[in-house]
Amino acid sequence: MLIEIDYRDKRPLYEQISGKLEELILCGVISSDESLPSVRSLAMDLSINPNTIQKAYDALEQRGLCYSVTGRGRFAAPVDEVLPAKKLEVFNELDAVVDKALKIGMTEKEIVDRVHEKAIRGNTGGKV
Amino acid sequence: MLIEIDYRDKRPLYEQISGKLEELILCGVISSDESLPSVRSLAMDLSINPNTIQKAYDALEQRGLCYSVTGRGRFAAPVDEVLPAKKLEVFNELDAVVDKALKIGMTEKEIVDRVHEKAIRGNTGGKV
Amino acid sequence: MLIEIDYRDKRPLYEQISGKLEELILCGVISSDESLPSVRSLAMDLSINPNTIQKAYDALEQRGLCYSVTGRGRFAAPVDEVLPAKKLEVFNELDAVVDKALKIGMTEKEIVDRVHEKAIRGNTGGKV
Amino acid sequence: MLIEIDYRDKRPLYEQISGKLEELILCGVISSDESLPSVRSLAMDLSINPNTIQKAYDALEQRGLCYSVTGRGRFAAPVDEVLPAKKLEVFNELDAVVDKALKIGMTEKEIVDRVHEKAIRGNTGGKV
DNA sequence: GTGGTCTAGACCACC
DNA sequence: GTGGTCTAGACCACG
């Protein structure tokens, strides 16, 4: 599977899992309307209590990143419908960090330079 | 007082308090070696248990943002000693957000533009 | 249990406990990723308030010697990650003592001899 | 004065002061039977409460590093009488550190080398 | 007065 | 069951 859990991560398990799934969907690794693994199979794969997986899926669905069809399973939501909201979310996070940076005396140039560096290095190296 | 508690905030009380104090110190609102409110007085002010304030101060001290002298009180640490580490920390947060943005298909330009906008609007209006 | 409280010790209880655990972890008596006793059970064992144990564990975690997973328990950190920093720490302590010794007129030979004696007697008999 | 107090130091003030005085006496900066500054004058010098100075002197006297003659003042004890006990004390500290070092897997050679380095660099650079 | 430690007992989220 | 947060109230050392 594409999901690995990090037990040192401070986030609750279900959030870690739903976060990872969200990323896979948004980046297109899981295509729109592709079926997601069943609660039970994923639970087996990760050696995790099914309740936890269920909770992860619930969170994911609530964020609009997947939908469930009773009796058929769960499917990834069409990315086009979700991306705009997600972009806004990321923008807000960006705002918060920039705000913090400005408050401790960093200049816009310093920030932009750092963004540039990161963009050049590419998004391949980044951890989630 | 300069600190207000937001009970809708999901973070624990002590973290909210230490975070707010950290900001006040880093931005120079509380100057270096200036005395911080005593555990008991701040507890009264905020109608919060002294133990919780103590924990907030412990966290603050652990991050190197203040030091305590038994029998005398607590004082803000010299910012110069802490700022470099804090800058690095913020840079890492920035990297993480930029990474997330790139992964969902944003361009460097989009990001830089947003940073620029935020910088122009000034750092006065931002929430912490 | 491997931990005993010495009520004549002037250090606070939580420090005594975290110190003892640190030693057990660093020496490999508790192996990496092995689970530590739960807050409540250790509190029962030592007849100490759970809050105190919690504080001891917090201190331990802050020093990077264990990590906690909510709902699952607490586990010893991989020693390899911590040993280098710890070595440096001990070296600094050593420097301080040697400095003190030299200042009161001891010779390097006297010091080295004492180290040698101690090394021969073995590290088994030493108190922590 | 030769004494400077560090308010960031975690030790209580009186201990810091008595410690500094002890060092001055043991190193011969204050010679045997030389008179120590009066409680009041030292309190003035350091802008510290006389009670604290009194406590420092009491601690010093109790450790045998000075003696008081009623009506005449306080005097440094003859170093020869105190040095042996102090040496033993430092040796014990040394033992403790060496023990700690051995326990985390350092070799005798590593320790001795460090001692040697420290001895070469001289005791001039060391902080108290 | 100050900070620091400890106890007792409660409540919550997570698994 | 686990860890984490919070309250209430007590005691101590320091200045």
Image (cartoon, coloured by chain):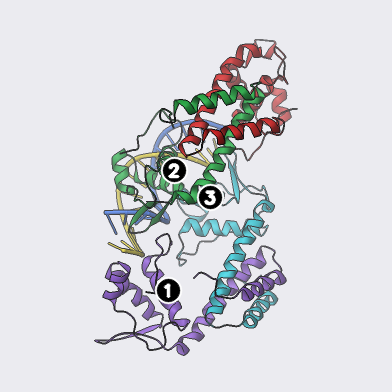
Chain colours: A red, B green, C cyan, D purple, E blue, F yellow
The secondary structure type at the circle numbered 3 is helix
Q: Is residue E11 left or right of residue C23?
A: left
Considering depth in this image, is A116 or B103 the residue closer to the camera?
A116
Circles 3 and 2 on the same subunit: no
Q: Is residue A86 left or right of residue D35?
A: right
x and y percent of residue E11 in the render? 42, 33
Q: Position of residue C74 (x, y in %)?
A: 59, 45
Q: For the residues carrying marks 1 and 3, which lies nearer the camera in this image?
A: 1
Amino acid type at image mark 3: Tyr
Q: Chain of mark 2?
A: B
Residue that sits furthest to the right in the current view: A1
Mark 1 surroundings within 10 Å by alpha-carbon count, few (fewer than 14), some (14 through 19), many (20 or more) = some
- Tell me the distance, in whole angstroms, between the alpha carbons under discs 2 and 1: 34 Å
Q: To which residue does mark 1 refer?
A: D20
Residue A106 in view here: yes
> What amino acid type should be assigned to the residue bearing mark 2?
Leu
Query: How far across and how far down the image is residue C88, in percent?
Result: 63, 61
Specify the quadrant of the image occupied by residue C18. bottom right
User: Given the image, on which type of amino acid does mark 1 rest?
Assistant: Lys
Please give the label number shown on residue A43.
none
Residue tagged 3: C57
Is residue D16 placed above or below B128 in the rendered structure?
below
For label 2, the SS is helix
The label on residue B26 is: 2
Mark 2 near mark 1, Cβ–Cβ under 8 Å? no
CA distance for labels 3 and 2: 29 Å
Q: Nearer the viewer, residue A21 or B4?
A: B4
All told, the count of numbered labels is 3
Q: Residue at x 31, y 74 (%)?
A: D42
* Tag in front: 2 or 1: 2
